[in-house]
Amino acid sequence: MRHVTLMQIFNHHIAKKYLSRSGIAHAIACAYHAFRLAKTYNVSVDLATKAALLHDMGHYTWYRNGKWDYDLYKKHDIHAIKGAERAHKLLIRLGENPIIAKEIAIAILFHTDSYMPEGFIKRTPLQEIVKLADEMDEEQGGMHHYRKIEKEKAIKMIERLDKMVDEELRNTPDKT
Ligand SMILES: [Fe+2]
């Protein structure tokens, strides 16, 4: 039995604010990739889908002289650190189990090497899944952050994924 559903997370105003900034279509696509990967890697689909949905909620835009500056952004990027903290706060507010909230936050923290030398992080299967799910949906020049999805379609996809997660947890109770 899950403490918090993907729909509860998705409907929260904090998630809405940050996910629309980093791309709702990207967040949902990653959550679906994470679901499939979690089954392959024998990891909890609950943790994997939540971490993937929220992995980019630390994103922000970086401007210089009123213009988006990607180089400057890359240089100063700490979105994984911000995202981990924001996701943790949101999950705790929604009543998530603190152990699960912590695991999800750490998976978000380690979903990218962008803020440290490559190869520095040795990932657990859950952390690896979030990184892979993100890479599977990546488009050149960060375009995946700008892909659009209709509101009704987004809600339907979250609803469907919640059902898939519940069913998987019912079938594999040892992985909850
Ligand atoms: Fe991402």
Image (cartoon, helix red, strand yellow):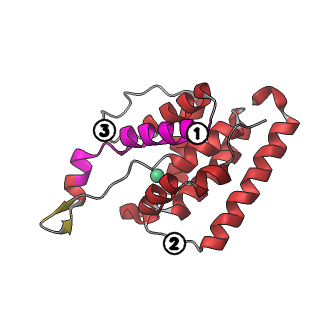
Q: Is residue 84 above or below residue 72?
A: above
The residue closer to the viewer here, 98 or 32, is 98
Q: Earlier in the sequence, mark 2 or mark 3?
A: 3
Q: In this view, does 120 lie above or below 18?
A: above
Q: Which of marks 2 and 1 is nearer the N terminus?
A: 1
- Residue under label 1: 129
Question: For numbered disc 1, what is the local secondary structure?
Answer: helix
Question: For numbered disc 3, what is the local secondary structure?
Answer: loop
Q: In what quadrant of the picture does the C terminus appear? A: top right
Q: In what quadrant of the picture does the N terminus appear? A: top right
* Amino acid type indicated by mark 1: Ile
Task: Describe residue 30's horizontal placement relative to residue 62 as left or right.
Answer: right
Q: How far from the left and from the top, in percent, is residue 19?
A: 48, 57
State the CA–CA distance, disc 3 to disc 1. 19 Å
Task: Describe residue 138's horizontal placement relative to residue 154 as left or right.
Answer: left
Residue 148 tag number: 2
State the CA–CA distance, disc 2 to disc 1. 24 Å
- Residue under label 3: 115
Task: Describe residue 12's horizontal placement relative to residue 119 as left or right.
Answer: right
Highlighted magenta segment, given as a residue range: 73-95
Residue 58 tag number: none
* Amino acid type indicated by mark 2: Lys
Q: Which residue is drawn at 33% across and 55% down?
A: 60
Q: How far from the left and from the top, in percent, is residue 130?
A: 55, 42
- Give the main secondary structure of the magenta stretch: helix
* Disc 2 to disc 3: CB gap under 8 Å: no
Numbered disc total: 3
Q: Which residue is drawn at 39% across and 41% down?
A: 80
The residue closer to the viewer here, 133 or 165, is 165
